Image: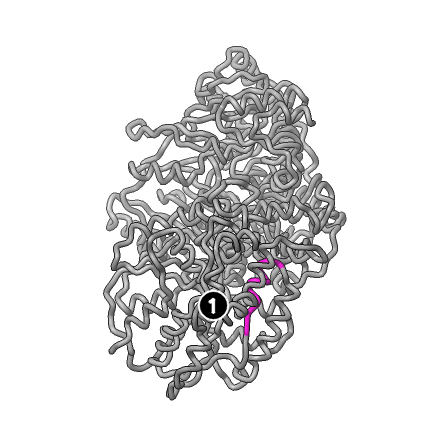
Amino acid sequence: MRQLTSELPYAARVDDSTRAAYTSDASIYRAVPAAVVEPRNRDEVVRAVRVAVEHGVPVTCRGGGTSIAGNSIGNGLVIDFSRHLNRLRSLAPDARTAVVEPGLVLGKLLSASARHGLTFGPDPSTLSRCTLGGMIGNNACGPHSVAWGTTADNVVDLDVLLADGRTVTARAGSSGDAAIDERLRALTADHLAEFRTELGRFSRQVSGYGLASLLPENGFDVARALVGSEGTCGVVLGATVRLAQLPKAKVLVVQGFDDVYQAASAAPALARTGVLTAEGMDAHLIAALRSRPGGSALADLLPPGEAWVYCEVPGETIDEALARAAELGGKVVTDATETAALWKIRRDGAGLATRMADGGEAWPGWEDSAVPPERLADYLRELHGLMDAMGRKGIAYGHFGEGCLHLRVGWDLTTARGIGEYREFIERAADLVAAHGGSFSGEHGDGRARSELLPRMYSQRVIDSFAAFKGAFDPTGALNPGLLVDPKPLDADIRPGPGHNRLELTPVHALSHDGGSFAGAVRRCLGVGSCRQSSGTMCPSFQVTGDEVHSTRGRSRVLSEMLRGEFIADGWRSEAVRDALDLCLSCKACKTACPVNVDMATYKAEFLHNHYKGRLRPRAHYALGWLPLWARLASVAPGLANAIGGKAVLRLAGLEPRRKMIRFARKTLRGWMRGRPPAPGSAGTVVLWPDTFTNLLDPTAGRAAVEVLEALGYRVELPEGPVCCGLTWHSTGQLGVARRVLRKSLRALESQLRAGSVVVGLEPSCTQVLRDDASELLPGDPTAELLKTRVRTLGEIVAAHEGPSPFTRLDSDAVVQVHCHQESGGGYGAELSVLRELGVDVDRIGAGCCGLAGNFGFEPGHWEVAQECAERELYPKARAASADTAIIADGFSCRTQVAQGTPRRAEHLAQVLRRALKP
């Protein structure tokens, strides 16, 4: 193996962090790769495949890793195209074609083609991270395939690298190699009857190879036949794809039904009316949605019913689309925001379905079956009967108009008995599909999940033809072995499996949503890959580096391997795990943006707590984790502390020397409060939480907040004695200290809480600790439980104010950086409402974390990532903003990042509100 890796392109990665991150995709399967290559050009792909074949190492291709069938993992060499070979090479609007590299994310192709009124028809719900190469491998479809077909229907030609090192261009009429053409034509001639009667019977028949495309009446289309071959015949280096014309107008119709069988019966007829989609969901999916933060608001957008079908209705004009929609009946949606919210429910289906409303786990496996559309209702009814007979619960949704069903089932995949029951269910379900003339796969491919079942669906002659087809391209079986031909057992290499949790532990956090189990919490990540998007809030470090290890999914996989204790065998002491978690900003975006609410910030804190237990920590942990203590000491002589602070102190403290030292306030918020008389408080009393940042570093926001609250009629108090939420100890994994500090602070606050006071938080990260983490760190503590119901942000207090307003309109513009803990907590809706009332036109930063993220941006080794996070959107908008445009950031870290990276200064919402107070 050492010789193999020495001959691979320099981009080859064999470290444990990387190998662990690639052990799985979005499936229930696990395979530890020998090496991972991220080629930058075609030559490096050719070299990697040549070296692997010479050493007898199998080759597996991977795009976004969103495969649900386990077709993008392997024990040999994994080639990840997504990081570098990801360009749109050309787009020809007149010809309606595009030339793409295999790692190009579908969403980028859709955006580029939409500018010309075009689209790529197949658009799976993973479009923000799935790649064209992966779609070609699986013959992906998506909701719009009702109108525009599957990936196979939309591929013109494929550039394919064969295992012997040759490159061919496959298209209709030729494979690009005369000898292969001869073999394929002979194979087709010998199997005309079978190809015509067993293959290509309906649009979603994806199982096996698409050999019906080789028939004379189908133009001997070799490119189309290779689509869906799952990387078993060749390595796709590029493709020319067809583009479809977008409608000039469209509206969404959502129909509600009394049960899912009615929806399944109605959808095929709806699909025949010329709609662009006919997507179905059942009530169990919506129940799971309601159990998620903010899910009920989304679910309330649906019309009454226990099942729903989404129909997107096109028209030459909006009036024509509306008229056609009215004919269908149901809820007609024209508002763009509401339409996007409704589609989000469907797009998040794979993630939502992995956790049922009662918290139970649900898994793919029988994820992707399809039957002729008119048989869907009967098939679904019988499938539910099978589930009832075997005591299984699950969530169904999918492309009902084409007979394709996605199903997540609550199997026990942690025990040998549970896996045996899984196999029994799959075999019985396969026979059920075959009896309905269906296909085990409708768009995700067969992979490890279904390849073993193919003889239950096809005759032996068709099975033999599959082997001959693969043999024509890959005679030595080097490419993605164990799939389609000579398959591995469907119950082999299952993740999590019986050995998933050899490392026993008692977490510090209650992990109340996961039964107190750290392993259960880590298992939340099923791999749907929402964290691999190139925009939005999750995951910042991945968006900067494009490295799978730096995604929430990659880190979850590394933690899983630590718990398994096989090739990462050193448990909490593992440097591979530490390195994988190092660039996690603890922004908590995954806690809400991830459809299964993975909370990597908490997992990282637990790991660091155990990793450094009984050992010296990095100096930065002492400097930043104990910041509340150092700041309190500095407050005794702030002038002296500021005078001696500088590069030397940063280096001595083990911090990033390119940073500027923070400054300590000459007068603390507590000191300022002591020097002024309290307001009468006609509206009642509130307790302002004097977090370290507001009290000791930047009291301007605190002073402004006091004046605003008093103008609203409140008497403002501080807690009775020094307090701290323990945030900095928590984020550096010093959880024992964090709990002690938090417990002491709650005692100082207890009497005010018992008196009915509301606690107003100004620093979003500290506010979120009080609202959420406190009760997880101190489970059963009555004060912590009471506190979480009493905490409000300043924006929430102002938005809820009744009576005369003390504010005047500002009628100005602002760039707003929402703190990532605000995003993951109560949201920023109240603050936006307040700003709108003030006449402030908000340009909201949509890229998530500013990059400083508390201690993260001050720690060595994080400078580049921290700066690149800010360069995604925050820095450019702050630099470009006019002098009279406010920069608003409630987080001290966010304001520090703006001050240290741009000529501007940011202010807290409290300062904006104070400016708006009437004279």
Residue 719 x/y as whole percent: 51, 79
Q: Is residue 123 visible?
A: yes
- The residue under the point 66% across, 48% down is 560
The N terminus: image quadrant: top right
Mark 1 lies on residue: 638
Judging depth in this view, the residue of 603 and 378 nearest the camera is 603
Q: Is residue 154 left or right of residue 784?
A: left
Range shown magenta: 723-733
Residue 337 x/y as whole percent: 35, 56
Q: Is residue 257 left or right of residue 6?
A: left
Residue 212 x/y as whole percent: 51, 25
- The residue under the point 44% across, 45% down is 868
* Amino acid at dot 1: Pro
| Among the 4 quarters of the image, the one containing residue 97 | top left
| Among the 4 quarters of the image, the one containing residue 801 | bottom left
On whether residue 725 falls in the magenta region, the answer is yes
- The residue under the point 47% across, 23% down is 223
How many numbered discs, if any?
1
The C terminus: image quadrant: bottom left
Residue 559, compared with residue 909, is above or below; it is: above
On whether residue 873 falls in the magenta region, the answer is no
Judging depth in this view, the residue of 198 and 165 nearest the camera is 165
Question: What is the secondary structure assignment of the residue under circle 1?
Answer: helix
Residue 398, compared with residue 887, is above or below; it is: above
